[in-house]
Image (tube, rainbow, N blue to C red):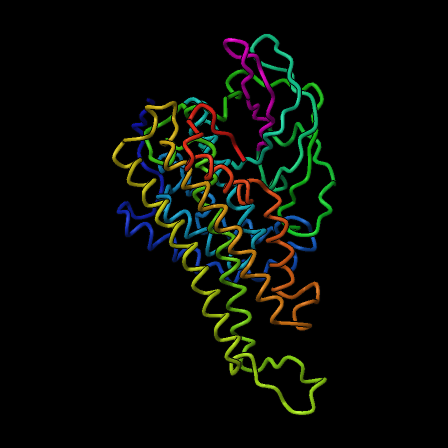
């Protein structure tokens, strides 16, 4: 275990409750700036410059970076709630923020202390990356990296990219490695033409024979080199699973808010019926459904929060982490994935129903509900929030799963 003795550089409160309150207040303070940037971000195909600056100003991009490196690390519950609040504004913004802040956390904890201190000495460096393997040739002092990597969310705002490749491991196994490459050494391609999540800018990049020294190579699936802070002890998959459910549940809550605001004046079928139909708010069938949708959304959120609380307690107490190769125990890993899949499925149902109830008022490209519908269906193409997690949960329930055979979605 590497333990830092550096003095904290953050100005955030040190107490858990006080830091949580401060963090959520910071997000509330930039909400209008984030809202104002949505249209420009959609047009650009990546986040508007002021949106990224707002996230920096609020400290959101440092919530997985240790305090002594200029971050302001928070617990898993607070991380979830931060991304949930951003997700209520815009899923693309929340997704990009999550990727970039996770990337900064990786740079802070996966590199050796000296290398990390150098990278973080002036400002918070941001990283985007892809786990799809490319090619690497071993050479003196490092690797020559060649290939193309796709689905690199946040690449337009990153200082570094991570390019995955495979190496021979012990006993004939294959292991993943990641090369950290400055964005000045890559070519960003224009290949992000998609239905939803347009503003994530999740395009591809390519490199040809770029040398990356050993100091900038790490195994993303292994225990971090620095493990003196709770979030640093999470493996890569839990790193993602703690926050991503928040963005879709935040988006679903926004969809409910949109249709509830329409309900008092929204009348379906008024152009056809001779009489004036009841508003949605006056209709018992709508009252019943909105009550059920709210309950479903609250249940999915409660599960995600409960899991994150349990993860926080495990890490705080020093159990279940590090001792098993940096992984949480199997039960918590399974619960994190299950809550993510449940969040995704629930959010999809809530957003779809809200869109349907809004009728023609929602179908224009630039409406909130239209954007949320496109975004949630695009998000669910990603395994982390898709229904494959339920299959894995079934394997766990049936006793077919172990830490060794557990797969990534």
Q: Is residue 34 left or right of residue 144?
A: left
Task: Indicate whether 236 appears above or below 350.
Answer: above
| Residue toward you, 134 or 331 | 331
Q: Is residue 105 left or right of residue 205?
A: left
Is residue 341 found inside the magenta-colored segment of the image?
A: no
Q: Measuring 49% from the left and 60% from the top, which residue is drawn there?
A: 31
Q: Is residue 229 left or right of residue 293?
A: left
Is residue 176 found inside the magenta-colored segment of the image?
A: yes
Q: Main secondary structure of the magenta part?
A: strand
Task: Indicate whether 374 appears above or below 390.
Answer: below
Instruction: Return the x and y of residue 106 as percentages of the image width and height.
Output: 47, 31
| Residue toward you, 344 or 251 | 344
Q: Which residues are magenta?
A: 160-181
Which residue is situated farthest in the front direction here? 398
How many marks the image carries: the answer is 0
Task: Indicate whether 11 appears above or below 137.
Answer: below
Instruction: Return the x and y of residue 7 as percentages of the image width and height.
Output: 30, 34
Instruction: Return the x and y of residue 159 as percentages of the image width and height.
Output: 57, 35
Q: In what quadrant of the picture does the N terminus appear?
A: top left
Q: Measuring 50% from the left and 52% from the top, which residue is drawn there?
A: 247
Instruction: Return the x and y of residue 407 as percentages of the image width and height.
Output: 51, 30
């Amino acid at each position: 275990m590497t333990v830092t003795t550096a003095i904290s550089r953050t100005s955030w409160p040190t107490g858990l409750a006080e830091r949580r309150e401060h963090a959520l207040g910071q997000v509330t303070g930039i909400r209008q700036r984030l809202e104002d940037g949505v249209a420009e971000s959609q047009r650009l195909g990546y986040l508007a410059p002021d949106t990224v600056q707002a996230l920096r100003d609020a400290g959101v991009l440092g919530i997985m970076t240790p305090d002594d490196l200029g971050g302001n690390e928070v617990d898993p519950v607070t991380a979830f709630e931060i991304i949930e609040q951003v997700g209520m504004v815009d899923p693309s913004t929340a997704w990009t923020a999550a990727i970039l802040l996770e990337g900064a956390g990786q740079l802070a904890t996966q590199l050796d202390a000296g290398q990390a201190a150098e990278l973080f000495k002036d400002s918070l460096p941001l990283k985007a990356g892809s786990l799809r393997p490319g090619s690497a040739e071993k050479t003196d002092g490092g690797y020559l990296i060649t290939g193309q990597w796709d689905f690199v969310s946040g690449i337009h705002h990153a200082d570094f990219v991570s390019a995955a490749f495979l190496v021979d491991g012990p006993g004939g196994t294959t292991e993943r490695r990641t090369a950290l490459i400055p964005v000045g050494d890559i070519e960003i391609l224009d290949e992000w033409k998609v239905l939803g999540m347009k503003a994530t800018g999740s395009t591809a990049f390519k490199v040809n024979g770029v040398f990356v020294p050993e100091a900038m190579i790490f195994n993303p699936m292994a225990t971090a080199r620095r493990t003196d802070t709770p979030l640093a002890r999470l493996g890569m998959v839990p790193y993602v699973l703690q926050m991503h459910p928040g963005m879709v549940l935040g988006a679903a809550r926004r969809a409910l808010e949109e249709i509830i605001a329409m309900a008092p004046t929204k009348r379906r079928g008024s152009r056809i019926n001779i009489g004036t139909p009841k508003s949605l708010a006056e209709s018992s069938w709508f009252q019943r459904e909105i009550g059920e949708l709210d309950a479903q959304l609250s249940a999915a959120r409660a599960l995600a929060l409960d899991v994150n609380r349990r993860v926080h307690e495990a890490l705080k107490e020093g159990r279940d982490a590090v001792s098993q190769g940096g992984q949480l125990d199997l039960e918590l890993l399974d619960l994190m994935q299950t809550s993510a899949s449940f969040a995704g499925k629930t959010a999809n149902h809530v957003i779809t129903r809200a869109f349907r109830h809004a009728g023609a008022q929602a179908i224009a490209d630039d409406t909130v509900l239209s954007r949320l519908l496109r975004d949630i269906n695009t998000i669910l193409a990603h395994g982390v929030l898709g229904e494959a997690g339920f299959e894995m949960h079934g394997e766990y329930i049936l006793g077919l799963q172990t830490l060794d055979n557990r797969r990534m979605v």
